[in-house]
Image: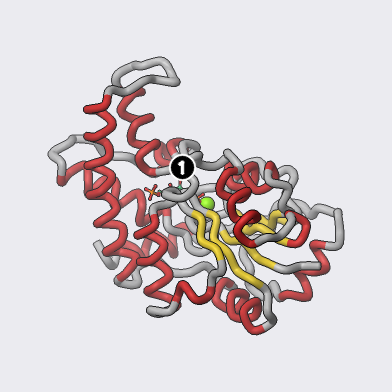
Amino acid sequence: MLQALIFDVDGTLADTEWAHLAAFNLAFAAHGLYWHWEEAQYRQLLAITGGTERLLHYWCSRKGAVSPAAPSVAEVEYMRRIHRTKTGIYTYLAASGHVRLRPGILDLLAAARDNGLRLAIATSTTTANIKALLGAHLGEGWQEYFTVIEDGATAPRKKPHPQVYAQCLAHLGLSADQCLAFEDSAAGLAAARAAGIPTVVTPSDFTTGQDFSGALRVVPDLTGVDLAQLRRWQSSAECLDPGQHSSQEENRGFLCVAL
Ligand code: XBP
Ligand code: MG
C-alpha cells in the first residue's frame, strides 16, 4: 500500500536549473572569472550532480586533467568559495519567488497531506536552496509538509548513487514498495531505482530527451495526477512511452524578469 511520496527538488518540484545556471554565471563574474556556461554546455554539465562537484569537474577539465582528476586542497576550497557565492545568488532568486513550482505539484502535496500520506525530499542540492524555494511557495511552515528531508549535506554521495533514497527509506521506516519517487533526470531515476523505489518521471527543460528506461511512468508534468492515479500506477508494472515537456521559453522568460 502506498505510504509516502518522495520528491526530488531540482527539475521536479520546480524547473530550477535556469536559476542555477544564472547563479553560476553571476558567481563567476563576482569572482573575476571570465567563465560563462552556455545553455547547451550546462545541459551536459548537469550529468555531474551537485554544484561543487560540477565546478570541480569543470575546473579539472579546463586544466586538461584526465577524469577522475584529483584537485588540490586549495583548488577544492576555491571552488567551494565560488559555490557559496552561487548559493547566495540562487537563494535570493528562489526566495523572492522567481522560480516557480511545476504544474500539479502544489495540488499533489496538499492531497497527500490531507490523505495521511507522508512526504519526503531526496535531493542532491544544498539545504539553503530547499528552504528558499519551498519557503517562497509553502510559507514559513514549509518543513511541516515533509517527514524526512535528505539533501546534499546529509547524503554526500550524489545521484546516481542511491544514498539519498536509501536514507529516506530508513528514516521513513518504510520499504521501497510502500513509496513512490518523483524525478526529472536519468541520474535521479537511476538513484531511486537502485534503492528499489518505483519512480514517476516528469522531464524538465534540461533533462528532456534523456533515457528514462525503468521509470514507472514518464509524464510531461503532474497536472491532474491524483492519489488514485498514483495508486493505479503503483499496482501496475506496465510502462508508458516517455512524454516530453516543452515550456523552456516560458521558464527562461520568467527568470529573466528577476535578472
Ligand atoms: C540537481 C543538481 C543540483 C543543482 C545544483 O540534483 O545537480 O546539484 O544543479 O545544486 P537533483 P547545488 O535534481 O538530484 O536535486 O549547487 O546546491 O549543489
Ligand atoms: Mg532533479
Work out which quarter of the rendered image holds the C terminus and state it.
Answer: bottom left
x and y percent of residue 94 in the render?
34, 65
Q: Of 180 and 66, which appears nearest the observer?
A: 180
For the residue pair 145 and 186, the one nearer the viewer reads as 145
Query: Does residue 159 appear to the left or right of 18 in the view shown?
Result: right
- The residue type indicated by label 1 comes to Pro
Is the residue 76 above or below the residue 158 in the image? Answer: above
Name which residue lies at 64% across and 54% down.
Answer: 170
Answer with the quarter of the image where residue 169 lies. bottom right
**Coloured how?**
secondary structure
Count residues near mark 1 (Cα–Cα under 10 Å), then give few for <14, some for 14-19, many for 20+.
some
Image location of residue 229, percent across then percent down: 77, 71
Give the side of residue 195 with respect to residue 154, left or right: right
Q: Position of residue 221 (x, y in %)?
A: 61, 64
| Label 1 sits on residue | 156
How far from the left and from the top, in percent, is residue 58? 35, 30
Q: Is residue 110 left or right of residue 236?
A: left
Q: Horizontally, is 14 left or right of 74 in the view? A: right
